Image (cartoon, grey):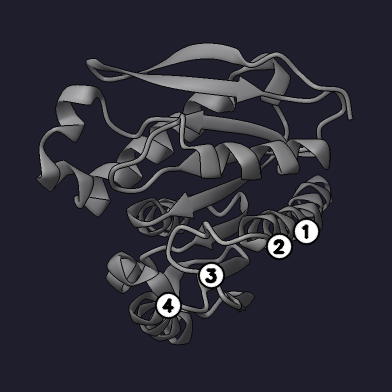
Amino acid sequence: MASVKPNISLIPIGRAKLEALLEVPDGAKGIVLFAHGSGSSRLSPRNAYVARVVREAGIGTLLFDLLTEDEASDRSNVFDIEFLATRLKAATDWIRHIGSAQGLGIGYFGASTGAAAALVAATDDETIGAIVSRGGRPDLAGPALPKVKAPTLLIVGGEDTDVIELNEEAYERLTCKKELRIVPGATHLFEEPGTLEEVARLARDWFQLHLRKSVTERRR
């Protein structure tokens, strides 16, 4: 898959303008929106790596900031899951009107609190084809968990014991197609050799399978 020059955009949401990097390969099978977690941004090297692997599989990516710099300086915003989910839904509506992304199956990739925002946002949009959580806090989605319809993959590091427990609890509450994958030897940020590569492989395969299905099912 040939590399694609990123389209640097501003997503207008109310009075805010969120910075974004949009890359859609020719003939894309779908597009994945990356919802970053606390202390992260569209420039996260970990999510940038996963996004590149996803694009190499022929799936577009949108990496964007859920909060402006001023908003992110208020820590209460970082953990306001409903607010973050509203931003993600607005970005989803925006991407549907972008020429290169129109008609594509849409997936969400969430990290940390971004994973909870993705799950909450998906409960109001049955067209979301797949969700992947990396080291996420799906437990923070609370009562939204049983309402999620999109196939959901939870990925956690094997050494991230507290987060494993939180993911196991959330996994039990999900009623959609779901998987929980634990990456051996990985801590919360998947900094150990080979662990982020495994995250990217798992995410790529999940989106390849389920975004293709979501597009096919909508055309019937």
Could you tell me which residue is drawn at 40 percent across and 32 percent down?
90
Q: Name the disc covering residue 186, or none.
A: 3
Q: CA distance from mark 3 to mark 2?
A: 14 Å
Measured Cα–Cα span from mark 1 to mark 2: 5 Å
Q: Amino acid at mark 3?
A: Ala
Mark 2 neighbour class, 10 Å CA radius: few under 14, some 14 to 19, many 20 or more:
some
Depth order, front residue of 28/75 = 75
Residue drawn at x 38%, y 84% is 165
Disc 1: which residue: 205
- Left of 96 or right of it: where is 87? left
Q: Are marks 1 and 2 in contact (CB under 8 Å)?
A: yes
Element type at mark 3 = loop
Mark positioned earlier in the residue sequence (4 or 3) = 4
Between residues 54 and 84, which one lies in front from this camera angle? 54
Label ID, residue 155: none
What is the number of the mark on residue 167?
Answer: 4
> Do the CB atoms of the residues marked 2 and 4 lie less than 8 Å apart?
no
Q: Amino acid at mark 4?
A: Asn
Residue type, numbered disc 2: Leu
Q: Secondary structure at mark 2?
A: helix
Quadrant of the rendered image containing residue 213: bottom right
Q: Provide the residue designation for mark 2.
A: 202
**Image depth: mark 4 or mark 3 in front:** 3
Q: Secondary structure at mark 1?
A: helix
Q: Earlier in the sequence, mark 1 or mark 3?
A: 3
Q: Quadrant of residue 17?
A: top left
